[in-house]
Amino acid sequence: GKNFSIEMETGTGKTYVYTKTILELNKKYGFTKFIIVVPSIAIKEGVHKSLQITEEYFKFKYDNVPYSYFVYDSSKLNRIQSFSTSTNIEIMIINIDAFRKSISDTRISNIIHRESDRLSGNRPIDLIAETNPIVIIDEPQSVDNTPKAKEALKTLNPLVTLRYSATHRELYNLMYRLTPV
């Protein structure tokens, strides 16, 4: 399928590598929509901080290409509208729990699966899915380890999924392995 694994030891710079991957995919192929899915709030905040710290460096390395990144917040759905309509590089950081709850039972579904007046009656997930984002999974062994999580990832309608981890449970089309040797 359209799933690829990248295996890198802990502490070797996975966040740096997938940030550079985002910018290279834009430079070479023009892709602009990226979603980084993480297993926890702590990792989500760490990824956001890494993007802040490296922003100046990457803008210098990539000729000031405009890009923005944000942490998904269900109380700020207008950011989803910007994500889906911008022509610049857009990077959304989201933890799996923000969109894993069943879409078939609207009583318990996440806000991302509900129609919103703030989005002209659209569901945020539909606006995201229409962009066919490139999905980057940070620590896939903790993100898509249940059938509901796998189903939730499909609702993003990814063009391709890149899985970065030191300890994959399942390898999908292994592209690269960085080992201690």
Image (cartoon, rainbow, N blue to C red):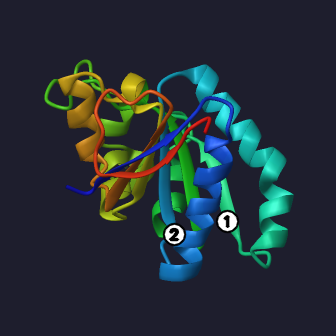
Residue type highlighted by circle 1: Tyr
Outermost front residue:
181
Judging by the rendered image, the residue that carries numbered circle 2 is 32
* Residue in the image at 40% along x and 32% along y: 140
Q: Quadrant of the C terminus?
A: top right
69 up-or-down from 33: above or below: above
Answer whether residue 131 is visible to the viewer in this image. yes
Residue type highlighted by circle 2: Thr
Q: Which mark is residue 106?
A: none
Q: Quadrant of residue 102?
A: top left
Q: Quadrant of the N terminus?
A: bottom left
Q: Residues within 10 Å of mark 2 (few under 14, many from 20)?
A: many
19 up-or-down from 53: above or below: below
Left or right: residue 153 versus residue 54 is left
Q: Residues within 10 Å of mark 1 (few under 14, many from 20)?
A: some
Q: Which mark is residue 67?
A: 1
Task: Assign a secondary structure to mark 2.
Answer: loop
* Residue in the image at 74% along x and 41% along y: 50
Answer whether residue 122 is visible to the viewer in this image. no
What distance separates the C-alpha of mark 2 from that of mark 1?
9 Å
Q: Position of residue 89 (x, y in %)?
A: 59, 67
Q: Mark 2 vs mark 1: which is more N-terminal? A: 2
Viewer-nearest residue: 84 or 25: 25
Q: Quadrant of residue 8?
A: top right
Left or right: residue 59 versus residue 128 is right
Task: Assign a secondary structure to mark 1.
Answer: strand
32 up-or-down from 103: above or below: below
Q: Position of residue 93 (x, y in %)?
A: 55, 42
* Residue in the image at 86% along x and 60% along y: 56
Q: Position of residue 24 (x, y in %)?
A: 59, 71
176 up-or-down from 37: above or below: below
